[in-house]
Amino acid sequence: MFFEGSEKKAEILIDTKKLSLLDDISDEFWSALVNCSQAKILSSIRNNYCKAFLLSESSLFVWQDRLLILTCGETQLVKAVEFFIKNLGSEVIKHLTYQRKNEYFANAQPSCFGDDIKLIHQYLPGKAYRFGEMDSHHNYVFHVENDFVADADDITYEFLAYQISEKASQHLTQPNLTKADIREFLRIDSLLPNFIIDDFVFSPYGYSLNAIHDQHYLTIHVTPQMDSSYISFESNLDLLALAPTLIDILAPKSFDLMSFNAQNFNAKLAQYIPKQYVSKSRVSTQLDNGYIVNFANYILPQTTFIEPIELDVLGDNHAL
Amino acid sequence: MFFEGSEKKAEILIDTKKLSLLDDISDEFWSALVNCSQAKILSSIRNNYCKAFLLSESSLFVWQDRLLILTCGETQLVKAVEFFIKNLGSEVIKHLTYQRKNEYFANAQPSCFGDDIKLIHQYLPGKAYRFGEMDSHHNYVFHVENDFVADADDITYEFLAYQISEKASQHLTQPNLTKADIREFLRIDSLLPNFIIDDFVFSPYGYSLNAIHDQHYLTIHVTPQMDSSYISFESNLDLLALAPTLIDILAPKSFDLMSFNAQNFNAKLAQYIPKQYVSKSRVSTQLDNGYIVNFANYILPQTTFIEPIELDVLGDNHAL
């Protein structure tokens, strides 16, 4: 059974003189927005700074002045973005970025990045970039073109693990796994002490976690099945510093690191990435909106031959 | 301007007691077959063993007892396979393999591998495999399941170069390039002495070459544009031994080697692949039809950061 773990992601910053997303907007609005993308809200947690919704496909975080939404699978996140613009008006939007990772099964997606940004561009003109090689892992980033300039301390990180070890995949696809089992496997207690945690175990497998503590957030989405395994971490905690632990847990054959505004990205790669991995691609720029964006893909060189994967000819191969 | 260079490929072996493809089948038939895939025949060459057609999207080779067809772009090769079966009957077919490489722009393809093999399976049941990782370069192979056993000396090779050097891309995308210019750049005279050659320069760029000599054949297809560059070589000459020359000419950031029935594949990798490349994936098996299939993907580790690629938001991004 294949599942497209790769996320689409949108971040919308708003003008708090006009609106507070956390206080002025009802849960019903967020539910309707999420439904537009063909996902739904499963549960939520909140603290003084943030409300975090766990979705049937990934997560929505709402702060006073911004929202972050990630959806995976065959959802169409751009429709949720359009819902936001149509209902709250483009004039409340200080800035918007829309991002999409390359997919395992691009053929099965209802739209591609090119389609999505044409739709957003009708409301909010912008620029778009590709980070990473076309024939390998890459991230598309669109941002609205206006006079917004990002704060240097608005720093976020993504760690995206592909092809996790057989051991990790087997562990995470066991029947009847509990939240506690998965939290223990992912060492959540030591990674996220003092965080409020909301998590969900999907059937037959798959796991999502939202965690918040003061102004910190972290979200994890686990697609554990061998062959299309993908585990994403997105946070304003320093995932470069946490990479050695995440790599130790998952032993992925390949992973991506991406950051908006990370300091010393290159030096931290040298410091934190285990030496057995080699870098296949490194991309860096400062966007017109001020964000310094870094992307790096790593692989684990292979020296032994493995058997091919046999496919079920009459099975559900519509996305291959 | 993007172009999908990755090929679909079919090889059909026939029972020469019932039919000779080279002698009994007219060019009109081949033209109609090629048209079914949405490609067309541009020209042809022949010797005593083989007729080789250059297509608007890749190549068709016809021997007494087999045909090999490759088509790229957004063609639908499986329709040509279906045309063959419907017109000549499945009873003349001793064996059939159908192969498809992962695409740069899977979203733009009219069908996926899973769709294609379901169609073939209606006429000729078979098995299917994936060589290479789902999140990286890979090849799908379908073969008919019957009592056919391949000759050990039926050996073919593929060398697939991705992300050729800026120098090679610039050279091959110059305006008004002639066949002679490209042959010189690719060192065709020294690689293929005594071969009959048929080649074509596409507009604004792109190049295809068919070459035959006695029972040897080689075909080259060049998609030179930076960002989706792809150059494929398919031959029954030993492309492992030629790899150092091809790598020297193209300096690709990544390449795949694939072979049916190559001897000492692993030892030859060690012998011929330059040490600066590292192997990202290695897959090997013996299929039920007797073919020993090997696949290896190599990358050139990157140590410096490059700028992202800026996209034209309103441009033709339908496949991204």
Image: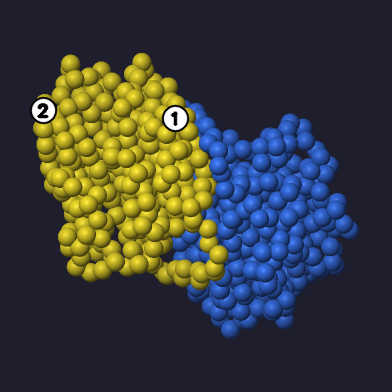
Chain colours: A blue, B yellow
Q: Is residue B123 left or right of residue A83?
A: left
Looking at the rendering, in which quadrant would you find the N terminus of chain A? top right
Q: Chain of mark 1?
A: B
Q: Chain of mark 2?
A: B
Q: Check disc 1 and report its element: helix, strand or loop.
A: strand
Question: With respect to residue A61, does B152 lie above or below?
Answer: above
Instruction: Determine which of the numbered discs, if any, sits on residue A209 in the image.
Output: none
Q: Residues within 10 Å of mark 1 (few under 14, many from 20)?
A: many
Question: With respect to residue B87, does B233 lie above or below?
Answer: below
Whole-percent x, y for residue A147 in the image: 58, 84
Q: Quadrant of residue B166?
A: bottom left
Kind of residue sitting beneath label 2: Asp
Residue that appears at 66% across and 55% down: A275
Q: Is residue A28 left or right of residue B13?
A: right
Between B253 and A47, the one lying in front of the other is: B253
Residue furthest to the front in view is: B271
